[in-house]
Amino acid sequence: TTLSTNIYVPLGELGSGSMMLAKEYSPAVCGKTAICSCSTNGCERTSFAFLRQELPVRFANILREIDLLPDKLLGTPSVQLVRSWYIQSLMELVEFHQKSPDDQKVLSDFIDTLIRVRNRHHDVVPTMAQGVIEYKDIFKVDPVTNQNIQYFLDRFYMSRISTRMLMNQHTLLFDDKSGSGHPRHIGSIDPCCDVVEVVNDAFESSKMLCDQYYLTSPELKLNQVNGKFPGEPISIVYVPSHLFHMLFELFKNSMRATVEFQENSPSLSPIEVRVVLGQEDLAIKISDRGGGVPVRKIERLFSYMYSTAPRPRMDDGRNTPLAGFGYGLPISRLYAKYFQGDLNLYSICGYGTDAIIYLKALSTESVEKLPVFNKSASKHYQATSEADDWCVPSKGPKNVAKQSAAL
């Protein structure tokens, strides 16, 4: 980790001025190999020594970016609530900076703090999403603000994925009360994650929902190609819960599109899945015959500011469906990118859509993709609108009949 400038987090509610909480460091990027090695060969004291410095760094970095949001968005009740959670968690974690890792009570208290922080941040995603809704309801959102919020939320949610990953690893391994979990897993990482098994689990879960809502659902047609070890089952070092999250979201979308597009057909086309392991990449391709999406709308599907989904009620945050905010695809893409993978959509309007998840086949290349707050990041929030140097077409299809009548 490299030292840069001091980090100051404004804490007006604790007094005037600013309070220096910690020195600003760049986050220390972890890889799956390093996490597994530390978890199997390391000890609780080593993990504690790392996390008591690393978690405050990641919380402090993202807090700086929260404070660069547009004032009107930052001032919404929901965003203020999220900000207060981060400040409170940062303060609690910094308390362990000078404590001895040889004291068993300190180690036990640290686990309790991690669990408390994790529970406090349980509703961060829907609460921040509610803040964006509050902002959009009151103020007009221009393209530049839209772009800045998209940039921030990608980084904010990626930071959250990373901190939860680290906290989960520590508590799963060292908290006696949390249970042993899967005997093969190292914390939340499966060193031999059976990809096809996760595909089947995610499909069955999606199928159950589809059957409940539509009283019908498409079948699965699965094919696997192991180009690295022909004839052997496909497995990689991965976090099964992350992979399940991505697949579940894609299957839900494909099933809904297929059922609605083929509602008058005597039978539904199957969802076709191909799992391919190469020398460097693992690819999971999900193909449906759900009618597809116009090219101009593809990027909107990954936008936090554009959602056609009905707005969920926030009366009970813990029961709020994440998909209700239209965040399923952008969050899934972040899960893929977290360990240097990706998630892309390719659609043929009037026919169907292919969704492809790319993951690193080599665990040595699967390192975290983390946001770092620096001058380059700061400049993104200062971007201004410039005239386009290309012809810009209209955002929607033109009404040719109306234009002809006008002529």
Image (cartoon, rainbow, N blue to C red):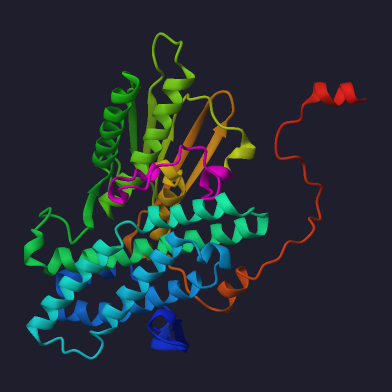
Q: Position of residue 143 (x, y in %)?
A: 67, 54
For residue 312, above or below residue 168: above
For residue 395, above or below residue 204: below
- Residue 226 at least partly seen: no
Nearer to me, 346 or 126: 126
Nearer to me, 302 or 182: 302
Query: Residue 88 appears in which quarter of the rendering?
Result: bottom left
Query: Residue 58 appears in which quarter of the rendering?
Result: bottom left
Q: Position of residue 170 (x, y in %)?
A: 19, 69
At 44% across and 71% down in the image, what residue appears? 62
Q: Is residue 150 magenta?
A: no
Q: Is residue 313 magenta?
A: yes
- Residue 387 at least partly seen: yes
Magenta segment, prevailing SS (helix, strand or loop): loop
Q: Position of residue 204 (x, y in %)?
A: 26, 31
Side of 47 where 248 appears, left or right = right
Residues shaded magenta: 299-323
At 41% across and 88% down in the image, what residue appears? 19
For residue 327, above or below residue 382: above
At 44% across and 81% down in the image, what residue appears? 12
At 46% across and 27% down in the image, what residue appears? 257
Nearer to me, 403 or 76: 76
For residue 294, above or below residue 49: above
